[in-house]
Each structure stands twice: as C-alpha cells, then as structure tokens.
Image (cartoon, rainbow, N blue to C red):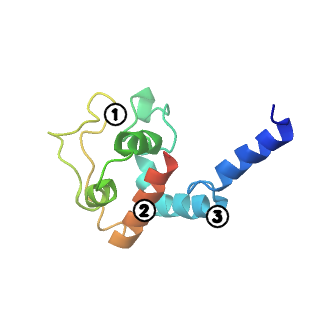
Amino acid sequence: MMPVRSIASLAVLAFATSAYADPKTDAEMLKLAAASGCLTCHSVEPGKKGPNGMAPIGPAWDDVAAQYAGKPGASEFLTRIVLEGSSPYSSHWKGKVSGLSMPPNAVAITEGNARRLVDWILAHGK
C-alpha cells in the first residue's frame, strides 16, 4: 500500500501540472474576462443563477469545456463564436441558459485574447 504522504504528493503534482492550475494564469484570464464583459453572462462553475433567479444567460465555462472536450477544431470554432457571435436558431444550450445567442464581441476583445481565453476555458475542463 502506498503511504498517504506519497498519494497526497501525487495528487498535488497532478493538479500543479494542469494547464488550469497556475494561479497567475487564472487571475490573468479572469481579469481579461471581466474587462471584456464575459462575466456579465458567463460564470466559471455551473449552477450559478442568472438575473432574477432565471437560468444563467450563458453557459458556465466548465460546461463549455465539457461540451467541447477532445473535439478537433474546438478552439478555432469557439474563438469565432466569441468574435462573431452565434445563431439563436442552432444553439445547443437551448433550455439550459436564458440567453438566446451570444452577441459578437470583436469590439470588446481582440482575436488573440479571445483565443487565449478560449484555450484557458478548454484547458479548465481537462
């Protein structure tokens, strides 16, 4: 049987090597998200309510990461959604969020920063 200290060390090592485990990166990305207006509609963890107790406006990023985990081209696709917006007619979040679609955000965030944020969100779900 492995000693408890070794098990704990392995757990810490596994968490520390995660792309999302860097507190500096987390703080940078949350600051970028707040400055770009993302946190108006999205949260990181699921289960948060939207205005007046309704469903959240947009999906939680943990849910986004789970939805797109392992899908080829996810980063490029989601970066385009952030910049150009989404169609209310093809939303797979229907019934899970109160927003109908994501508005275009190219005026609020650069393509490079949108990609950084999307990659951070996707890494969060790993």
Label drawn at residue 24: 3
Are the residues at dot 3 and dot 1 in contact (C-beta closer than 8 Å)? no
Judging depth in this view, the residue of 63 and 43 nearest the camera is: 63
Judging depth in this view, the residue of 61 and 97 nearest the camera is: 61
In the image, what residue type sits under mark 3? Lys
Mark 2 or mark 1, earlier in chain: 2
Dot 2 falls on a residue whose secondary structure is loop
In the image, what residue type sits under mark 1? Val
Where is residue 115? Give x, y as percent: 38, 65
User: Residue 110, can we see it?
Assistant: no
Q: Residue at x 48, y 45 (%)?
A: 125
Estimate how packed mark 2 is, as few (under 14), some (14 to 19) or many (20 or more) residues with alpha carbons within 10 Å: some
Q: Residue at x 42, y 39 (%)?
A: 63
In the image, what residue type sits under mark 2? Ser
Q: Residue at x 26, y 60 (%)?
A: 80
Mark 2 or mark 3, earlier in chain: 3
Task: Please state, as top left, top right, bottom left or bottom right, where the N terminus lies in the image.
Answer: top right
Where is residue 91? Give x, y as percent: 22, 39
Label drawn at residue 97: 1
Which residue position holds label 2?
A: 36
